[in-house]
Amino acid sequence: MVIQRNNILLLIIIFVLSISTCRSNFIDDDLFKQVYNNILEQEFAHDFQAYLSYLSTNIESKNNIHDFNNIAKIDKNGIRVIDVCSFGAKGDGKSYDNKAFEKAWKETCSSKTPVQFVVPQNKNYLLKQITFSGPCKSSISVQIFGSLEACDKISDYTDRRHWILFDSVQNLVVGGGGTINGNGNVWWPYSCKINKSLPCKDAPTALTFNNCNNLKVKNLKSKDAQQIHIEFESCTNVVASNLMITASKKSPNTDGVHVTNSQNIQISDTTIGTGDDCISIVSGSQKVHATNITCGPGHGISIGSLGSKNSEAHVSHVTVNGAKFIGSENGVRIKTWQGGSGEASNIKFQNVEMQDVENPIIIDQNYCDQVEPCKQQYSAVQVKNVVYENIKGTSATKVAIKFDCSKNFPCEGIIMKNIKLVGENGKPSEAMCKNVHFNNIEDVSPKCPSVESSKDEALLYNY
Ligand SMILES: *[C@@H]1O[C@H](CO)[C@@H](O)[C@H](O)[C@H]1NC(C)=O
Ligand SMILES: *[C@@H]1O[C@H](CO)[C@@H](O)[C@H](O)[C@H]1NC(C)=O
């Protein structure tokens, strides 16, 4: 914090000096760079582990995370600004702006000093599939003030997995308050989920970050993605905040934020309402922390699905602290396919409000998201050490708590504390508990059938 204060002090001094000398280019390049880099370091050198440690309720204040967008603004002088319009982007919503964006990116990525890539406001930039590749020479802030519009000709997508892709760009910030519109309504009718007579094919993720470390994505709207809205793939140290993600409740596979094979991910202050999971966290992900999330419509916050096609999956140290679910299909969910292996462990769901949620609390180890029924298999992804704490509200169905765990690999070390879920209009709800071992149950309603005592050392339900 001392360094941070020093930085602010330094900036004030620079500011005052720059006014008193009336020279807009007063700021010494090296000095500025030093300040900027210090702030970058603080931004990312945050010890994510501190607030992700299992069972810790002490979440570090978000205010500690410095906002260096402000710095970028101060410095119309110090940091280079690269505006897509000066590279020929029209933003008329009719002509493709790919070429201009690509040229601007080339310039941005090769800059040896920190640079701001700007997409000006009040315009719609029509884009076909586009990749922003690294590694780049300096840290980059991409400020999207306007709207990015996806090409709506399916045949123009040579890569069916991505629309906008940031690949191997380190120390990146993406923000600006603008909109990313995937125009997914042209894709959705071709999903096998919508039209059962069609084969199942991928549709692009609207915004993908692949192999990006020290990444901040904040203050953006993402709507109507072709499939997933925002994906973090093989990334570390990510802060995602103030995102607004929306798509029709009926849109297929339009997950809000998808985290795969990534570590140290913080998602906060985000509102998501789509046709699939608000947040999905899949194999290879660790230390994922979500806070102040509003979800619905959608399929809830999901760990998984894991273990499809007999795969091995590992997800651990996930915390959801502070979430509100409104009319979603699920609340907090862990879903695994039969026949998988590996584990989902050290997971904590706390301070959650449910409003008319179909399955507020669910572990589903018989997940089967395919046309053919899934056959019984021996192995399963082990679910272990899961804490549910302070979860209240209403269930839209009779069964508010559903533990459908594997017979051969029961759910282990489940802790439930201070849970109160009722049916609509305060009607009683029920719990369904199959193959689950509890470490502790305290103040939980509804209870598993035939549970009287809550103080037993190990509570085991096998049905
Ligand atoms: C579903 O796809 C089939 C095969 O392409 C097509 O003939 C049919 O019109 C589609 N149904 C709807 C409701 O779009
Ligand atoms: C929670 O997130 C919402 C945006 O989804 C934001 O408006 C609100 O201020 C946040 N609350 C806190 C306490 O940060």
Image (cartoon, rainbow, N blue to C red):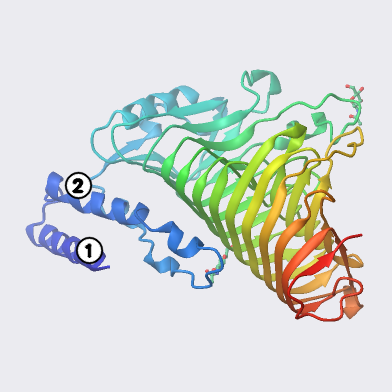
Above or below for 131 versus 36:
above
Label 1 beta carbon within 8 A of ligand 2: no
- Residue 149 or 91: which is nearer the viewer? 149
Q: Specify whether residue 228 is in view.
A: no
Which amino acid lies under the numbered mark 1 shown in the image of this protein? Answer: Ile
Locate residue 320 relative to residue 335 in the image: left or right: left
Of the four image quadrants, the one with ligand 1 is top right
On the image, the x and y values in percent for residue 316 come to 59, 52
Q: Relative to the observer, which residue lies in front, 328 or 309? A: 309
Q: Which amino acid, mark 2?
A: Lys
Whether residue 362 is situated above or below residue 197 in the rendered picture: below
Mark 1 = which residue? 3
How far apart in space, not on screen, are marks 1 and 2 (Cα)? 15 Å
- Judging by the rendered image, the residue that carries numbered circle 2 is 33
In the image, 317 versus 188, the foreground residue is 317
In this image, 242 relative to 425: left or right? left
